[in-house]
Structures are given as C-alpha cells and as structure tokens.
Image (spheres, rainbow, N blue to C red):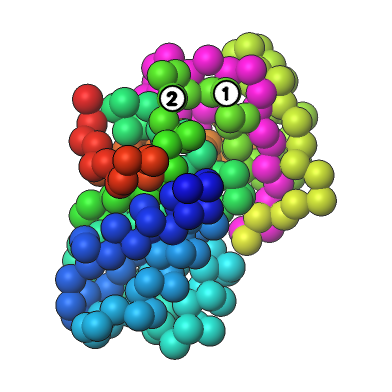
Amino acid sequence: MDQNQLKKETALAALEYIKPNTIVGVGTGSTVNFFIDGLAELDFEIKGAVSSSEASTQRMQDLGIKVFDLNEVNETIPVYVDGADESDAGLNLIKGGGGALTREKIVAACCDQFVCIADESKLVDTLGKFPLPIEVIPMAQALVARKLEAMGGQPKLREGFTTDNGNIILDIHDLQITNPLEMEKEINDIAGVVTTGIFAINAADILLLGTQKGVKKILPA
Ligand code: 5RP
C-alpha cells in the first residue's frame, strides 16, 4: 500500500469513534480529508462539526456537513480527529505542516478525546526531524527567530504563506525535542509566538497508525 492508501485506511478507522447525534472536532490535512469524506457517508446522523481551518470547513460544507462556530457550541464535543507530522511513543506530536496548528490546538482543547490518525512514517523516537512549525505575529519574526536560534534551532520563514489568523509560520530545523512538554511551554512563553506545533500539554489520547499490516491502535507509553 502506498502512503495515501495508508492515510485513507487510517482515517476511515477513526469513524468508529464517532457517535450518532454528536458534534465532531475536525483537524486539517490530507489524512483528515479522507476522514471528512468518510464522515459525509456515515449511515447515521451527526449534528455537525467544529473545524480547525478554512480548508476543512470548505470541504465539509461542500459535502453537506454542518460546521458550527466554536463559540456557539455549548455541549461536550466527545472526539477530535486530526493528523500529525510526527508522534513519539508518548503521543506527543508535531503538527502544523499545513499551517493550521493554532486552530487545531484550540479545537483539540475543546474536545474530550484526541484521536490522531497517521501513517507509520510519522512515528519517531524523538520529535524534531520534521521542522517544527511556529505561528508568529509578523512583527515578532526576528525576535522569535533569535530566541529559537539560541535554543539550537535553525528558523526558516515559510515563504508566501499566511495562516488563517493572518500570521506567519517559522519552521524550525535541527531541534532535538527530548522534553516536548517543557519545550512547548518555553516556546509559547516567547513574546510574539501565537503557538508552537508541539502538542504535549494536550497530547493525543489515541494514535491510529496506518501500517502495511493494518491500522494499529497505540496508547501513550
Ligand atoms: C496541519 C497538520 C496536519 O495534521 C499535519 O501536517 C499532517 O498532515 P497530513 O495528514 O497531510 O500528512 O498539522 O496543520
């Protein structure tokens, strides 16, 4: 199976976590797109979804899925389903390859359970081989870049990209993220950082990992 088929199989496995008559938290990316397509074909009704990006909102609306404004939802959202760029065995993640990290973190924080869907290439021993995305207020670009250099990283501006929130992304190369929780807090404390793509404070609860031998369910080590 190629990587796209693994992503699809994994995304469809996440549909098992969706219960009738609930609102679903929906992430962003190519794996999530397969999940959205599956949501539209469920043989039971859901109330709708809350979305982590304009792209996912558009895809869901095109398929007839109602998308709620997060601020209008006053009920429990049982499940958030999203992809990742990397996961370690503790289900700490790097996210933001698609630039939606801030909204993803907000929606994830509103949901009871975070089901991460990824193909087997995303599971790593130590986070950081994938350049860490950080959403930054534009006027703080140089300040944040200097601070990340001091932490041992090599920041690169994501050229020609603006987030749904009107900000820039710095992709930080060459970081060895051995303590994701501490590094998430440290980076989030830098003035001008909106958020970092490390998801450790709210790590995934379940990782569905697409492998050549089927979809494996992995719980935090
Ligand atoms: C977007 C993300 C995505 O979940 C991550 O980049 C994985 O994407 P894909 O499913 O396309 O491999 O964090 O901001």
Tell me what residue is drawn at x 40 percent, y 64 percent. 35
Asked if residue 112 lies left or right of residue 200, the reply is left
Q: Nearer the viewer, residue 12 or 26?
A: 12
Q: Is residue 76 above or below residue 104?
A: below
The quadrant holding residue 133 is top right
Residue 60 image point, x, y percent: 47, 77
Residue assigned mark 2: 124
Q: Amino acid at mark 1?
A: Lys
Label 1 element class: loop
Label 2 element class: loop
Magenta stretch contains residue 122: no
Residue 170 image point, x, y percent: 69, 36
Q: Is residue 186 above or below residue 14?
A: above
Give the extent of the magenta segment: 165-189
Residue assigned mark 1: 129
Q: Amino acid at mark 2?
A: Val
Neighbourhood count class around disc 1 (C-alpha, 10 Å): few under 14, some 14–19, many 20 upward: some
Q: For residue 113, say whether it is visible.
A: yes
